[in-house]
Amino acid sequence: MTKKWWHGKVAYQIYPKSFYDTNGDGIGDIRGIIEKLDYLKELGIDIIWISPIYQSPFVDQGYDISDYYEIDPKFGTMEEFDELLLEAKKRDMGIVMDLVINHCSSQHEWFQKALADPEGEYGDYFYFRKGKDGNPPSNYRSYFGGSAWEKVEGTEFYYLHFFAKEQPDLNWNNPKMKQELFQMINWWLEKGVAGFRIDAIINIKKDPTFPSYEPDGPDGLVRATKMVEEVDGVGELLEELKEAAFEKHQAFTVAEVFNMKEEELEEFVGENGHFSTMFDFSAHMLTFGEHGWYDGKEVEFDTWREITFRSQKRCEGIGFLANIIENHDEPRGVNTYLPSYAQNIDGFKMLATVNILLRGIPFIYQGQEIGMQNCRMAGIEEYDDIDTKNQYRTAIEAGLSREEALEVCYRYSRDNARTPMQWSGDAQAGFTTGTPWLKVNPNYRQVNVEDELKEKDSVLNYYKKLINLRKSEEYKELFTYGSFEPAYPEKEKIYAYYRSLDGKKVLVASNFGENSMGLELEGHNEKLLLYNMDEPEVSEGKLLLRACEAVVLEVR
Ligand code: GLC
Ligand code: CA
């Protein structure tokens, strides 16, 4: 495998609106990111992905871009962004921008021109189609609920939007539109960004005949992704994108991909793949309900272990996946993947250990490193997220009571991850001196950066040790390039695996069960590298793992 500059790096996702506010308007800003760069450096971060900060009306929190060349004034100025690039570079860190190119905002100049003349030049930058017998052109349901087609008042046209109606899909069959995007991407790369996290990219390939399919829900619609799964040829577009932009800059790219065809993995993240890496969402997908959050599922340990191990094995010899336990679209990982008895500091560290040491590129989502948790809201009014509001409505329509629907949001809402970063025990968690745009999780008095920096055994200090180990001179090759092999698969509630390279072998073992479990070790000469509780019991080739215990051992 050819070595690349980003192999062995640790990445961190910033959700800028909730990261750190320096001017008291209740919204995180670029200046706030600059001020916290040293904090991230200390943590061991090399690559910072920032969720969208482009000009946007914020219908979907910046994932609706109205000008790809501007920074939204909420976040600051282009000069501040340049300063951020410079300051990151000084610290040997790379900035990765979010690239939202499946759709733009309905406020984008292109779309405004298109609306004025759907059959004109800019109309073809999007998908405008005539309706059929007073109905939309096809029966697709958008990701956020309702038809994916929106009627243009006073005309017979509809336009396609996979997400909100304020996020019209861009027509990738239009060469001019594509060139405009490629040019824009190059412009950012030339500025010095290290790469991109690429949003919803699998959706760019459409079947321009837009066939209807058998409905899959009581609304008579079918999820729009059905068409994405049916259509071939996304690979050609992705190659074009790579060649036109990423390749010549050696950019790091991490794609958000659901609905990929299994056999295409190598084309996506292989040696000459479309992307450097893509997120492993296999664990997150275990929570998906058939009709929405209201019939979402609890993660069951055995399935979770099996599915995450399978992901590891399937990219062996092919490439790397990006490993996460949460992001801005998911609830907090500690709430999702830990059973209730393990939702404590030991459990948080345990989950971190097994996740961060997997083969792949670890991505830490802001606040994960201090053990931030889902946040209870008093009512639906306290939520901001467009998806949460839709899902709440869907749940009520399906017959759930208000309390039940709210409970569903507590478990699955994207706002769980979007509450402000908890910097200290001061008012508003030290995030802002003003009124935060979204409620601060009241547990900030116990869970915050300032206190955790001081406490030796905090989750934060454990994350530092963990990242340190991963990147240490002695083990970085092993944790980067070493193979992955499941360990003790027959043991109940034990999540354990080996990472090995050139005769060196490390066991990562943890106990997600409520009872202690004894493991027979391979060999009798082991070296303790890391543990999350007080010193573990290892002797004569035996390891006793207590509930919530995680141990990293070199075995010889
Ligand atoms: C991606 C983003 C999500 C956004 C959607 C539409 O899934 O992560 O936050 O709502 O794309 O851009
Ligand atoms: Ca601000």
Image (tube, rainbow, N blue to C red):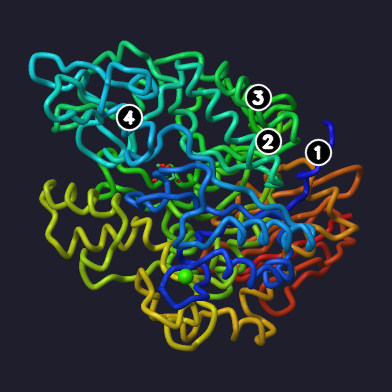
Q: Amino acid at mark 3?
A: Ala
For residue 113, which numbered disc appears in the image? 4
Closer to the camera in the image, 36 or 200: 36
Quote the CA–CA distance across marks 4 and 2: 35 Å
Relative to 331, 9 lies left or right:
right
Q: Amino acid at mark 4?
A: Lys
Q: Secondary structure at mark 4?
A: helix
Q: Amino acid at mark 2?
A: Ser
Q: In the rendered image, is residue 388 in sight?
A: yes
- The tag earlier along the polypeptide, 3 or 2, is 3
Indicate the position of residue 263 as horizontal and vertical percent values.
57, 20
Identified at 33% across, 41% down, the residue is 107
Indicate the position of residue 15 as horizontal and vertical percent values.
50, 59
Mark 4 and mark 3 in contact? Answer it, CB < 8 Å: no
- The tag earlier along the polypeptide, 2 or 1, is 1
Residue linked to disc 3: 244
Indicate the position of residue 80 as horizontal and vertical percent values.
61, 62
- The tag earlier along the polypeptide, 1 or 4, is 1
Residue linked to disc 1: 4
Q: Amino acid at mark 1?
A: Lys
| Whether residue 67 is situated above or below residue 346 in the rendered picture | above
Quote the CA–CA distance across marks 3 and 1: 20 Å
Q: Of the residues tagged 3 and 2, which is closer to the observer?
A: 3
